[in-house]
Amino acid sequence: MTKRTIATLALCLSATVLAAEQEMPLPPGHPEIAHPSPSSMPESAIGTLRIHAQQKTADGPSLQGQKAIVHFYQGDKVIKHVDAVLDANGEATVGDIPLTRNAVQALVMVPYGNITYQAVSHIMNSAMTEAKVEVPVYETTRDIPEWKIAMRHLMISHTSAGVRVVDMLAVDNPSDRTWIGTNEHEEGTTLILKLPPGAGNIEIGDGFTEHSLHFHNGTIYNVAPMTPGMTHYSFGYTIPVKSGKVEIPINTPALTQQLIVFAPNDGSEIKANGLLEQGTRKTDGGEMRMFSGVALMPGQPSGLTISGLANTPAAVGGGWSTAQVVAASALGVVLLGGIGFMLLKPVKPKAEN
């Protein structure tokens, strides 16, 4: 994602959370919480942002003297740009932020070790003039951490072009260093995912960029660094139907603690491999059959074979819309965090010869 996209999505998320907090009823006996109405807010004010960049690697050096790049967004427009310098505590203060009744958020970027770490502040406006943002920063390593896939969800839909798959992963790096990958590619590969035979029309979302994604012999190679903690990845592809069926093998590159697959309950025959069927769930996109697996080891086979389908040409597009993916959160299980912002976009990955 671009920095502008990240800031815009964060604004949308904060606005949604704020609206939910205002509409949620308070427990009986809880004192009322006053929310300033736009008419009661000052027309303008000056704000202050406090930045704290934290060195999270145990033996990492001080961040004193490192630069923090700050963009203040109002909607998708940058209203102020500041380059601050961190002190011995990794802190910096930015003042003189022009505020009105409209929401403003800061995107803070700390370039360190050839990687830019970033975080987004809470909303600021003329009634909320102060904000603080924490930016974790890490040393890098080429050593492979004991990373795992904490949760993985696949959403399957049928289209005129074939079977569309949207794949979402929450990957956990338990170390305190950013893994910059193996030497599969010059930049360093951190995630390798083999796609089903014939898969095409690749689209990417969280965790990928057009520059980080390489595609070779039906396999995705991602060269983006893997930071400590949880990283979300999302991508989609289409598989053409041949001889009335589609096989969807699921590649497990690391220990996968939980895997859930949703497929339309439309009368087609589904055979599960290494997964247990868990009944059906109703969604705005229709009734879905649910399959799951737990504690899948690296390389352990799993997937679905769907038959009784009409043949289709080569994969050219179609599939779940963002609204349908969001609606799937009502399935009775918790989908990956941030799934509402998994905006897939077409991409032409770098082809490897």
Image (cartoon, grey):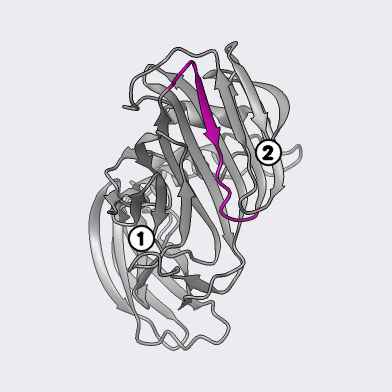
Percent of width and height locating residue 5:
32, 48
Residue at (45, 12) in percent of width and height: 310
Q: Is residue 174 left or right of residue 324?
A: right
Q: Which residue is mark 1?
A: 107
Q: Quadrant of the C terminus?
A: bottom left
Q: Which mark is residue 247?
A: none
Q: Nearer the viewer, mark 2 or mark 1?
A: 1
State which region is magenta.
Answer: 241-255
Would you say residue 167 is visible in this rendering?
yes
Residue matched to label 2: 26
Find residue 328 and report its image quarter.
top right
Number of residues whose C-alpha sits closer than 10 Å to that of mark 2, classed few (under 14), some (14–19) or many (20 or more): few
For badge 1, the amino acid type reads Leu
Residue 100 place in picture, x, y as percent: 30, 51
> Does 251 lie within the magenta span?
yes
Q: Tag 1 or tag 2, which sits nearer the N-term?
A: 2
Q: Amino acid at mark 2?
A: Leu
The residue located at (23%, 56%) in the rendering is 79
